[in-house]
Image (cartoon, helix red, strand yellow):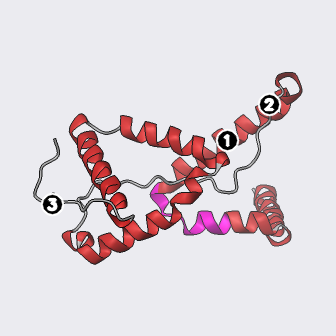
Amino acid sequence: MLRQLADVIETAVQLAESLVVDPILRRLFEAFRVMPLEDRGAIVTAIEREVQARRLSRATEDATGQAMHPNPHARLYLRSHQQAMPRSMLERDELMLAMLSGMRASPILLMPEIHASWLDGTREALEHLDAATRRTVAQLMREALALVDEADGGPAVEDNSTARAS
């Protein structure tokens, strides 16, 4: 019994020492410590799955010519939007600023190394929408194109704010 206690203490000391000397392990432990308890199982499962895939990749990369690398921008959490957007978020000024921000960032989507991914991602996003929502998107896109023409000195666009998506 005393020997088992000494073994447990020795293991605890080794673990504590490894945390002190390895800053990456210390960061991982701290992130896990502050993580919501209900998230831990899913996060550990994801890490285990990815490590297993990486180990398999390393073992087969010479034969397959494919290798895996860490993604410094990977996310372990998905965003979900199940609640309706509050009306205050849809006020004119907020909409204008959001559109301005998006439009100013749009040139990056035409960069060759990004454009194909944007097309694929947009195509997939549209597949997740029902037909009525896709028609609404199409109507808004047509109106946006007309507004671009108007801003460039073309014909004025009538206000279709009360029109329904067709």
- Residue range in magenta is 29-38
Q: Position of residue 68 (x, y in %)?
A: 76, 39
Is 136 displayed left or right of 105 in the figure?
left
Distance from disc 2 to disc 3, alpha carbons, whole Å, reads 52 Å
- Residue pictured at 29% horizontal, 44% vertical: 138
In the picture of the structure, the residue carrying the numbered disc 1 is 50
Circle 1 — which element? Answer: helix
In the rendered view, tell whether residue 61 sits above or below residue 34. Answer: above
- Residue pictured at 58% horizontal, 46% vertical: 115
Q: Position of residue 71 (x, y in %)?
A: 70, 51
Circle 3 — which element? Answer: loop
In the rendered view, tell whether residue 23 sits above or below residue 83. Answer: below
Distance from disc 1 to disc 3, alpha carbons, whole Å, reads 48 Å
In the rendered view, tell whether residue 159 sits above or below residue 135. Answer: below
Q: Quadrant of residue 159?
A: bottom left
In the picture of the structure, the residue carrying the numbered disc 3 is 161
- Residue pictured at 31% horizontal, 39% vertical: 129
Name the quadrant of the C terminus: top left
Q: Earlier in the sequence, mark 1 or mark 2?
A: 1
Three-letter amino acid code of the residue under disc 1? Glu
